[in-house]
Image: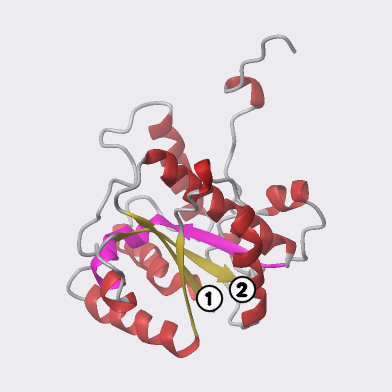
């Protein structure tokens, strides 16, 4: 997929890419994306983000480590935070359910085929074949507003990637392997893993990348007064 010409196009064409080409991404391109993203909004200019980048041999070594541990722990080693609230209520529960159904439908995996679903989910831990892996961390002493700052930094990274003809997939699933990530990256004790992100070139031939999630119409969530 070609580069995005402007911000609107970058937003419109950003997807969660779940199959990447093996084509390497130039190191300078990755550095440029992360550097420009420094301008993302940050309350009080705290800039509470830390980014760790893996590619080449270090990425291969990390994936081999996780692969070896997946055999005994197919669901990971325990999440450090809830990716979704417990007892997710409507309408959020139905949205999540539909997203899952639509995703697995693209690759012909039935809802009752749990082993196939687990195999597909495990591709998270191969970064869906992406040549670059990013890990985003935050100081444990920070609160929800600073997590919001980190999210805005990540969104900026994803849009800058589109500008350069790249795609991404944000992966909170990595919290289930936070101990192994912390060990491999030798994270300081005060840093907490928030999310991983796969970065690379979209495989346009793979059916899983045809998924486009439904979004609510503007008037379903926006209230206008005085306009």
Residue at label 2?
30
In the image: residue 139, left or right of residue 210: left
Q: Quadrant of residue 119?
A: bottom left
Q: Residue at x 46, y 36 (%)?
A: 95
Vertical side of 43 occupied by 226: above or below: above
- The residue identified by callout 1 is 132
Instruction: Measuring from the top left, give residue 224's x and y in whole percent.
Output: 66, 14
Frontmost residue, 138 versus 19: 138
Residue at image location 40% in from the left, 53% down from the top: 110
Q: Evaluate if marks 1 and 2 touch, with contact meaning CB atoms under 8 Å apart.
A: yes
- Which numbered disc, 1 or 2, marks the residue closer to the eye? 2
Marks 1/2: CA–CA distance: 9 Å
Residue 129 is at least partly visible in this image:
yes
Instruction: Identify which residue, 204 or 200, lies in the foreground.
Output: 200
Whether residue 108 is visible: no
Q: Position of residue 138 (x, y in %)?
A: 38, 56
The mark that comes first in sequence, 1 or 2, is: 2
Q: Residue 22 location, x and y as percent?
A: 58, 82
The magenta stretch is 165-181
Can you say whether 84 is above or below 224 in the image?
A: below
Compared with 182, 111 (above or below) is: above
């Amino acid at each position: 997929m070609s580069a995005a010409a402007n911000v609107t196009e970058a937003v419109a064409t950003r997807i969660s890419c779940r199959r990447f080409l093996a084509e390497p991404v130039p190191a300078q391109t990755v550095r440029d994306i992360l550097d420009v993203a420094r301008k993302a909004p940050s309350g009080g200019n705290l800039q509470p983000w830390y980014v760790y980048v893996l590619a080449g041999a270090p990425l291969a070594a990390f994936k081999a480590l996780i692969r070896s541990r997946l055999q005994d722990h197919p669901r990971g080693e325990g999440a450090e935070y809830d990716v979704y609230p417990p007892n997710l209520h409507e309408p959020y529960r139905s949205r999540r359910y539909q997203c899952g159904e639509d995703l697995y439908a693209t690759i012909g995996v039935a809802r009752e085929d749990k082993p196939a679903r687990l195999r597909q989910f495990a591709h998270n831990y191969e970064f869906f074949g992406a040549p670059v892996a990013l890990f985003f961390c935050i100081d444990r002493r920070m609160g929800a507003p600073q997590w919001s700052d980190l999210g805005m930094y990540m969104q900026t990274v994803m849009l800058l990637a589109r500008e350069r003809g790249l795609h991404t997939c944000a992966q909170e699933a990595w919290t289930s392997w936070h101990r192994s990530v912390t060990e491999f990256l030798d994270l300081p004790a005060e840093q907490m893993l928030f999310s991983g992100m796969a970065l690379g070139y979209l495989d346009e031939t793979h059916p899983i990348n045809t998924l486009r999630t439904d979004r609510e119409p503007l008037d379903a969530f926006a209230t206008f007064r005085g306009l």
